Structures are given as C-alpha cells and as structure tokens.
Amino acid sequence: MSLQFGPEYVRALAPYQGGKPIAEVAREFGLDVSTIVKLASNENPLGMPASARQAMLDAMADIGRYPDANGFDLKAAITAKYGVPQDWITLGNGSNDILELAARAFVQPGQSIIYSQYSFAVYALAAQAVGARSLVAPTVAYGHDLDAMAAAVTGDTKLIYVANPNNPTGTFVTAAAIEAFLGKIPPQVVVVLDEAYNEYLPAEVQYESIGWVQRFPNLLVSRTLSKAYGLAGLRVGFGIAQPGITDLLNRIRQPFNVNSMAQAAAIAALNDTEFLHKSAALNAAGYAQLTTEFDALALEYVPSYGNFVLVRVGSDDGAGARVNLALLQQGVIVRPVGNYGLPQWLRISIGLPEENAAFIAALRRALA
Ligand SMILES: *Cc1c(COP(=O)(O)O)cnc(C)c1O
C-alpha cells in the first residue's frame, strides 16, 4: 500500500474553483488578452480606488519591514467607521481568512457546521478542512431558509455560516429575519454573518449588523475590501465580534496575515466614500442593463442584491457548461455554477456598461 499523509477529510478536499484567469482563456482559445471580458469573480469593474493606489505607493518605501502585526492604524479606521472597540476586530487575509479562522477556532473534528444549500463554496471547504460534519439546510427560492437553518442545530453544532447577500445566488434576507434567527440560536453556537456584498445594498434594505454584535456575544460579522472597495488582489477583510470570539481568532491567525501595503490601501479605501458610492451606482445601472436583456430574452434570473446575477441559460443540465463554453470561445469569462448544484445557471458579475454589452452580444450568439 502506498504511503498516505494526513487525515481522510483533508485528502478528500476538492480545491476551491475560482474564475478562469484572463491569460489562461487567451492561451486556451487563441484570443488576444485585450479583447477578453472577465465577469467571473465579482470584482469591482472600476478596479482599485485612486486613493488606495496612492496609499500603497507611500507604503512601499517601508516594505523592507514587517507589517504592524496588530494593524493598529487599520483597526483605528474600522473603529472610526463602525464605532466598535479595537479588541472587537480581527483582520484577515481577505474575509476568507476570517471564515476559515472561525472554523479552526470553534470546531473540532466530528462536530457540525451549518450552512445553506447554494451558499458560498468556502463554507463547505472550511468545514471539511477541520474535519467537521456539514449540515446543509435546504433553500427557499435559492436563498437562505433561516427557519430551516435554526431547526438544523444539534447538540454538537458549533458554527453557522449565513451569507447576506448570498453568493452565488444574490439573495437577501431582511434585517428582521436575521434578528429573529439570532434570537433562536443557542448562545454557545457561533454565527458568522458574511456580509461581503453589504456595501451594494440599497438604502431601503440596509441594516446595522454591528448593533447585533453588541447584543449577541456569539455573532461574528465579516466584511471584505475585495468587492465594493475594489481591492480583491490585495486580500484584506475583517471580522467584528465581542472579545470572547475575537480573542480566539487573533490567537490562531498568522501574526502578519495582512501585509503592509494592504493595510495602507484598506485605510484609504474605507475612507473613500465617494468611490464606494460610485461603485454602488455603477452596479445598480449594470444590474438594470443585464436584467432588461434577460427579460427581453425571456431568461429566468434570481433577483440579486450583490454585484452579480444568477441567470438560467437553459432547461437541461448541460446548459450551463454549453453556454459557458460558447461564451469563452467569444472571449467572455463568466462563472459556471454546476459545482454548486446549479448546472442550468451561470453567474454573471456586473461589469462596466461596455463589458455588460459585450457579454449580452456574446450570450445572444451563444443561445442562437
Ligand atoms: C467574495 C466573497 C467573500 C470574500 O472574499 P475575500 O476576497 O476573501 O474577502 C466572502 N464571502 C462571500 C459570500 C463572497 O462572495
């Protein structure tokens, strides 16, 4: 028998599948890099804010030194913006880091983690990486069924992931529903409320999750600089929770998990409300542009609160892969979601108006 390393649950892990890189598609399909449109990873089509670029240039002079392991200035910026004490903040190498730290800090092999069907792929990976049992709650209308999630709690449940808005479906649960849900969860079960797309929410549904952190010692809210703030390549996110949770996360994280350029850029971006408003407005216009076309093509889509839309491109289980390939051949990269159990659908990140138009033109040809 050949030598096998590590526990069975690690060997059984299937790595996260990201959006296809532009250079790879260019190589595979013999296309010019400059003609390719990538709407596959929910990135901000504006790129980074100019304020963050300048902050990074300034920070570059000190790159020979280690970063501030406690991220004092970045935490101060978060404190100023959200009104939480510094010892309620955990910085992460992307919010992905926060999601994984939570599984490592609170769950032992064999204990259970709850998340929803059709929710973010990282939850399943984080659970499996620590040898946890995943309890997957069924959805309603492609979104979180919080009642089903609360009902799934068992004696050994240690962690629950809720994405609001959810990726890849774009669904949203209201503040009232989340608050009622938090009231039902046993206090020893940690709830991670993953708000990666929070900044895109229209004012009328926006809510104050930080207030819940004050009331619920078992709540961990996670935020990212990767989406509306335009810094996906830098890897910065953060978690907000009371010290009982935050202290443990900070013990197990790498000491320098957020690099110094990223800390500097994040401070600038958090303070750049103009960029944030511009990003949200561009996203709303792009959403209207795409969904108008989907309506014209009589394609079903899930109403989205994020910077992407899930659209059904056919009624057979080969449809997603087939239309995806036809789009790739035309230099348009979107995200197939067969691995989420949605083989008839594609997830389209909202781009610049001309990128959305290029996608629509390619989609029309792909469906013809
Ligand atoms: C994109 C995304 C994240 C965050 O990604 P990071 O770049 O690691 O911050 C977290 N949760 C959801 C649901 C996402 O879609």
Image (cartoon, helix red, strand yellow):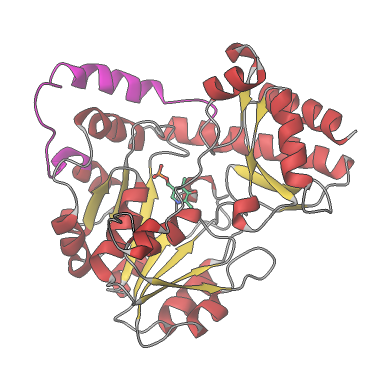
Question: x, y (%) of residue 232?
Answer: 41, 34
- For the point 17% across and 47% down, which residue is it? 254
Question: x, y (%) of residue 346?
Answer: 69, 45
Quarter placement of the N terminus: bottom left
Q: Residue furthest left?
A: 65
Q: Is residue 315 left or right of residue 223?
A: right
Observer-nearest residue: 188 or 174? 188
Magenta extent: 45-74
Question: x, y (%) of residue 255?
Answer: 13, 45
Question: x, y (%) of residue 364?
Answer: 85, 31
- For the point 65% across and 14% down, which residue is it? 31
- Whether the magenta-drawn stretch holds residue 72 is answered as yes
Observer-nearest residue: 243 or 78? 243
Q: Residue furthest front?
A: 1
- Whether the magenta-drawn stretch holds residue 267 is answered as no
Observer-nearest residue: 286 or 281? 286
Image position of 137 with respect to 344: above or below:
below
Q: Residue furthest right?
A: 368
Image quarter for residue 256?
A: top left
Image position of 231 with respect to 199: above or below:
above
Image position of 363 with respect to 297: above or below:
above
Residue 210 seen from this side: no
Image position of 58 with respect to 153: above or below:
above
Q: Is residue 246 left or right of residue 110?
A: left
Quarter placement of the C terminus: top right
Residue 3 seen from this side: yes
